[in-house]
């Protein structure tokens, strides 16, 4: 009998579902707006249309390991309910997946954060994990 193999988790951190805008800045300064699908302490999955995905990833060819596409990501997280803080993170597009005819998901792995960005993301993800109801 053959042992079952598990698909590796590309992020070793738990992900939380989040729907929020994110601005991706290419090295040439071009700014593109996408939507966050999920967030972890080490990365973010974003959704965008084919035109935006094509601007971020030439020929819509998934990045090969080690040939990541460098970007900056700007998004907000609520530190307290009434006070969102802006996060600026440098990262790499490491994943591309077509979801539908005009919907793509891009995985961005964070490289580093400006200021206290990592602490704010960590706090937000931890809060969402605690607040998520467990299945019965």
Image (cartoon, helix red, strand yellow):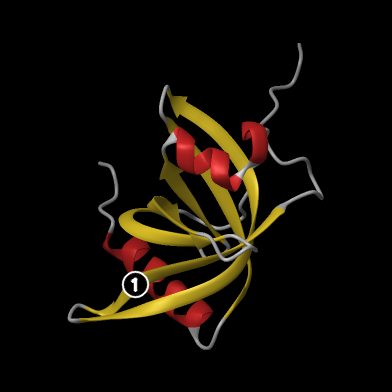
Residue 39: x %, y % from top left: 45, 57
Residue 120: x %, y % from top left: 43, 79
Q: Residues within 10 Å of mark 1 (few under 14, many from 20)?
A: some
Identify the residue under disc 1: 77
Left or right: where does residue 82 sit relative to residue 84? Answer: left
| Res 7 seen here | no
Name the quadrant containing residue 75: bottom left
Going 45% across and 49% down the picture, which residue do you hit? Answer: 46
Left or right: where does residue 94 sit relative to residue 132? Answer: right
For this rendering, which residue is in front, 30 or 45?
30
Residue 2, above or below 130:
above
| Res 100 seen here | yes
For this rendering, which residue is in front, 102 or 119?
102
* Quadrant of the drawing holding the C terminus: top left
Residue 79, above or below 58:
below
Going 25% across and 53% down the picture, which residue do you hit? Answer: 133
Left or right: where does residue 37 sit relative to residue 78? Answer: right
Residue 122: x %, y % from top left: 47, 74
* Quadrant of the drawing holding the N terminus: top right
Residue that extends furthest to the right in the rendered view of this protein: 66
Residue that extends furthest to the top in the rendered view of this protein: 1
For this rendering, which residue is in front, 43 or 20?
20
Residue 98: x %, y % from top left: 51, 28
């Amino acid at each position: 009998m053959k042992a079952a193999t598990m698909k590796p988790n590309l992020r070793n951190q738990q992900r939380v579902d989040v729907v929020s805008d994110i601005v991706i800045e290419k090295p040439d300064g071009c700014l593109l707006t996408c939507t966050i699908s999920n967030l972890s302490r080490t990365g973010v999955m974003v959704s965008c249309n084919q035109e935006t995905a094509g601007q971020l990833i030439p020929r819509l060819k998934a990045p090969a390991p080690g040939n990541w596409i460098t970007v900056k990501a700007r998004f907000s997280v609520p530190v307290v309910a009434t006070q969102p803080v802006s996060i600026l993170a440098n990262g790499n597009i490491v994943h591309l997946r077509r979801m539908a005819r005009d919907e793509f998901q891009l995985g961005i792995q964070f490289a580093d954060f400006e200021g206290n960005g990592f602490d704010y993301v960590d706090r937000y993800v931890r809060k969402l994990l605690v607040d998520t109801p467990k299945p019965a």
